[in-house]
Amino acid sequence: MNNDEMTAGASKVNGTAVAGISGLTARTVFGTVAAPPGQSFALACDGGLIGAWLSEEREVDGPLLDGTDCILVPGFIDVHIHGSGGADVMDATPESLATISKFLVRHGVTGFYATTVTASHGDTLAAVSNVARFCRHTCSDAGVDSPVGARVLGVHLEGPYISGKFPGAQNPAFVRPPSANEFEELLGAGPVRMITLAPEEEGAQSLIEMALESDVRVVLGHTAATFDEARTAIDAGVSQATHTFNAMKGLHHREPGTVGAVLSDDRIYAQLIADGIHVHPAVMRMLGRCKGPTRTVLISDAIRATGMPEGRYDMGRLPVVVRNGACRLPDGTLAGSVLTLDAALRSFMAATGWPLVQAWPTTSLSQAQAMGIDDEVGRISRGARADLTLLDATAQVVATVVGGRVAFLRDQWRLLGTAD
């Protein structure tokens, strides 16, 4: 049986109907304050929330997910992803978002922020509006037979208010100064939760204030900001850095630049593309030491080529060639990645030497805290959403649970107490 067959495209895993699991077991649990002996706890089916810990003697009434020899962690959250499985957020179609959603659960992701690229206002507006429609549809069609995939948690606007000096793979034809009118229209169109911008650009300060007043996280990226300019932006409320080291003013011992501000300021969460291509493993290790596990935010920055054969694709109307695991524009500029978050975790652990017990927050808790949703996800606690990931001893994904429902299952035998 292949992964597609075991991914719950509907509320079925390998033909078995699963409205929700009543509980699961695991050998080890990370992401909780304390777990009783037995490492078995129940998931409330009502609303898909995490329930109480159970003793080994008490039987679970209903379907059980057997996590024998597995490690249970909070479900992964990707705050920076453009696409996967041949689909892209900028396609502005519900089918594309559904494709991305169903692809991500195969890699432990239970929630993601649909990320746009620097494009025309019309194209960006269409993408944001599509996310709003998709979210309304999936919320209203969350019955027993509805599809189970990673939830869209909101929109991340990457640009267009960035620096022309550091466009990276963003289309320079659409880079422009901050516009309050444009931004207000985007806020009205859909669930914008984060925006990446260059804080040194004229008009950025006003937009930062506007975003924060609207409870939108502001991220510095694609920026030529000096150390002082970056620190001023952080003082103003900027709280994250987009794909740290990439497309930003680098570190110099007399001018620390944007990178120096990110590494030295504990208020900033640092996004990292841990594929070993965008950032050298030694530099990943340095970032881990500076930021720690709860300020390091692993991201995929994945494009539509993720999970697809290598070849020619596009990103923001720019041609992209994927070869040897790297995505590049014709001039050699890196253009997103084909990384998945589970692979990012394994790569980061290898680079830093951190064991999973230390590294797990970089895929969930850090993201949840950075986005202000850690009361709902990113932890394993009673009353939180039952968004969970089971890993084996090598940090490969065994199962993904979204809202108490099995969305991906590698080993069918682990699902107990169901009728065909």
Image: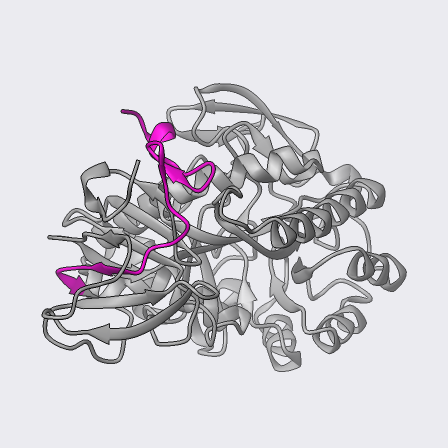
Q: Is residue 160 left or right of residue 227?
A: right
Task: From this view, report whether residue 317 is shown above or below residue 213.
Answer: above
Say left or right for 210 vs 409. Answer: right
In the picture, which quadrant includes the N terminus?
top left
Q: Residue at x 33, y 65 (%)?
A: 43
Pinpoint residue 6: horizontal percent, then vertical percent: 33, 34
In the image, residue 225 lies at what x, y percent? 63, 64
User: Can I make out residue 65 in this image?
Assistant: yes
Viewer-closest of 342 and 178? 342
Q: Quadrant of residue 276?
A: top left
Pick out the residue farthest to the right: 181
Q: Which residues are magenta?
A: 1-28
Report x, y in % for residue 237.
Answer: 63, 78
Quadrant that contains the C terminus: top left
Work out whether residue 290 or residue 260 is closer to the camera in this orientation and state it. Answer: 290
* Above/below status of 108 relative to 294: above
